[in-house]
């Protein structure tokens, strides 16, 4: 799902996005996104993860399923961007994208199979 001109307030100073994304990633189980998904669903958080770019997008969710994202909502990982602040930022964005893709595809699968309502 996309929305035009996605901006993150107050993160555009040099290094701000890197620090913010590092904090976001530290709170995630990057090796086991499905563990985080299980906990979140258990506590009623059924939102999809999104990343910021030129627009927001939901890795692992085909555009044809955007209505599902609208229904359940989304939470964007702060510090992701299409403006890359060096190699470490690019690597962190790749980790965030891989995590979100696994998380979202499994959440979508559970919704479509009726395991999450």
Image (tube, rainbow, N blue to C red):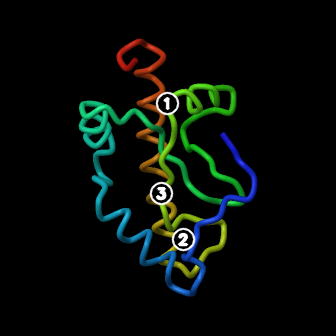
At label 3, counting other C-alpha atoms closer than 10 Å, the crowd grade (few under 14, some 14-19, many 20 or more) is many
Residue at the farthest bottom position: 14
Disc 2 element? helix
**Cβ atoms under marks 1 and 3 closer than 8 Å:** no
Separation of marks 1 and 2 at Cα, in angstroms: 28 Å
In the image, which is nearer the foreground, mark 1 or mark 3? 1
Residue reaching furthest right? Answer: 4
Mark 1 surroundings: few (<14), some (14-19) or many (≥20) residues within 10 A: few
Mark 1 lies on a secondary structure that is: helix
Q: In the picture provided, is 98 more to the left or to the right than 82?
A: left
> Is residue 72 positioned above or below 5 on the image?
above
Tell me which residue sits at (44%, 37%) in the image.
Answer: 47
Residue 46 picture quarter: top left
Q: CA distance from mark 3 to mark 2?
A: 14 Å
- Residue annotated with mark 2: 90
Q: What kind of element bears circle 3? A: strand
Q: Nearer the viewer, residue 68 or 28?
A: 68
Would you identify the image quadrant in which residue 62 lies?
Answer: top right
Check residue 72 in the rendering and tell me which mark sits there, or answer none. 1
**Residue at numbered disc 3:** 77
Q: Mark 3 or mark 1, which is nearer the start of the sequence?
A: 1
Q: Are marks 1 and 2 in contact (CB under 8 Å)?
A: no
Give the image location of residue 89, x and y in percent: 51, 74
Query: Which image quarter: residue 27?
Result: bottom left
Q: Residue at horizontal 70%, vertical 54%?
A: 55
In the displayed structure, 80 sits above or below 13; it is above
Q: Earlier in the sequence, mark 1 or mark 2?
A: 1
- Residue 16 circle label: none
């Amino acid at each position: 799902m996309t929305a035009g001109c996605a901006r993150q307030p107050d993160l555009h100073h040099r290094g701000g996005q890197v620090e913010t994304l590092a904090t976001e990633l530290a709170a995630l189980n990057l090796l086991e996104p499905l563990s985080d998904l299980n906990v979140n669903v258990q506590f009623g958080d059924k939102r999809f993860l999104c990343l910021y770019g030129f627009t927001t997008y939901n890795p692992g969710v085909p555009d044809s399923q955007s209505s599902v994202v609208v229904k359940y909502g989304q939470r964007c990982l702060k510090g992701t961007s299409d403006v890359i602040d060096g190699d470490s930022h690019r690597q962190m964005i790749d980790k965030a994208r891989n995590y979100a893709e696994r998380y979202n595809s499994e959440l979508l699968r559970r919704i479509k199979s009726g395991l999450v309502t």
